[in-house]
Image (spheres, grey):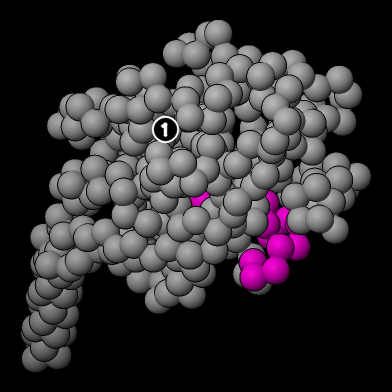
Amino acid sequence: MFFETRKVAVLACLLAGSFAFQVAGSGAGLAAEQNPFYQGKTLRIIVAGQAGGGFDIYSRAISRHWGKHIPGTPQIIVENVPGAGTLVGAKQVFNAKPDGLMIGNFIADIALGRLLGQPGVDFDVRKFEWIGVPVKDSIVCALTKASGIATVEAWKASKTPIKLGGTGRLTVPDNAAIVVREVLGLPVHLVSGYGGTAPIRLAAESGELDGGCWQWESIKATWRAGLQAGNVSIVLQLTSEPLPELPKVPLASKWVQSDEGRKLIAATVETTPPITRLYAVPPGTPKDRVKMLQKSFMDTMKDPEFLAEAKKSNLEIEPTNGEDVGKAIDSLFQLEPPLVAKMKQILLGN
């Protein structure tokens, strides 16, 4: 009888202990939910371009709304780290601590640089964790009224090369200018090394340049005054289809006679623009935080307050999720070797 009673007592203690453990465990889980990782923290967006440029304007608008869609509602700040066509900022993010507290915003053509063996792109871009892209970009060439060029015909007939601004090797402004010169045969003098599209725009307004080729979505937001006053003209579209807003502006592909030329245009200035404005976190960032940031980014893209601000600022919003960004990046590395060799020849000169 004594032993039976003792067994019952021991069993009761074990059951009580198990119940207490379960309650404690549930409490810990509840505490984790109530105190998410980002609570009380600051999340930094590293914009790999200068203040005032298209990347910067988009990131600052997004930063004002993104935090409320992240559990814990972290503070979000934007830092500009320009240099080498966004490569400096991209490298900083790639090598940063993978804790989910730093997000990079840099140009997709860094992946093209990796594909073509560009010096300085000494890291595997495909290892980034992709968060998303806010807009599908389309490349156009904008020239000032002072350049005297308002049509492709006038450009082709120009006795002197048209000065186009660039931001560095294998970035959109440089790639587009080189393609216009090497594939279309238009007279171009590429002046590279500007810190972003904002300095290119200012240089064109001062007469230092004739214009440049970069994202229409950025140009119409940042060069709106020039367009409205007639001081800036969109002369050429480097897109697969005419943009609805530019129905009378000719496509570059229509000025190309060979299949190789059309493939070069597609590979160099039509593949990466839809994912140009990449947002990414360092390799090795915990998957749960990656998914959280991916979801919150896409939720921000649907936020009525954000969309109202974007509309007021003339910012187009047509997002791409992180998974699809990764697929687009991977597709670059599946191009035919002969085409890659030709791209390397004309874009890098070797």
The residue shown at (76%, 19%) is 255
Q: Position of residue 110 (x, y in %)?
A: 60, 56
Q: Amino acid at mark 1?
A: Ile
* Quarter of the picture holding the N terminus: bottom left
Q: How many residues crowd mark 1 within 10 Å: few (<14), some (14–19), many (20+)? A: many
Q: Residue 156: name its quadrant.
A: top right
Image: 140 above or below 23 = above
Q: Nearer the viewer, residue 195 or 295?
A: 195
Q: Residue 32: name its quadrant.
A: bottom left
Q: Position of residue 124 (x, y in %)?
A: 64, 65
Q: Nearer the viewer, residue 99 or 106?
A: 106
* Residue sitting farthest toward the bottom: 2
For mark 1, what is the residue? 219
Q: In this picture, which residue range is highlighted in magenta?
A: 107-121
The residue shown at (65%, 40%) is 177
Q: How many circles with numbers are drawn on the protein?
A: 1
Q: Position of residue 142 (x, y in %)?
A: 51, 29
Image: 157 above or below 277 = above
Image: 215 above or below 190 = above
Q: Position of residue 206 (x, y in %)?
A: 40, 43
Image: 36 above or below 274 = below
Q: Nearer the viewer, residue 36 or 135?
A: 135
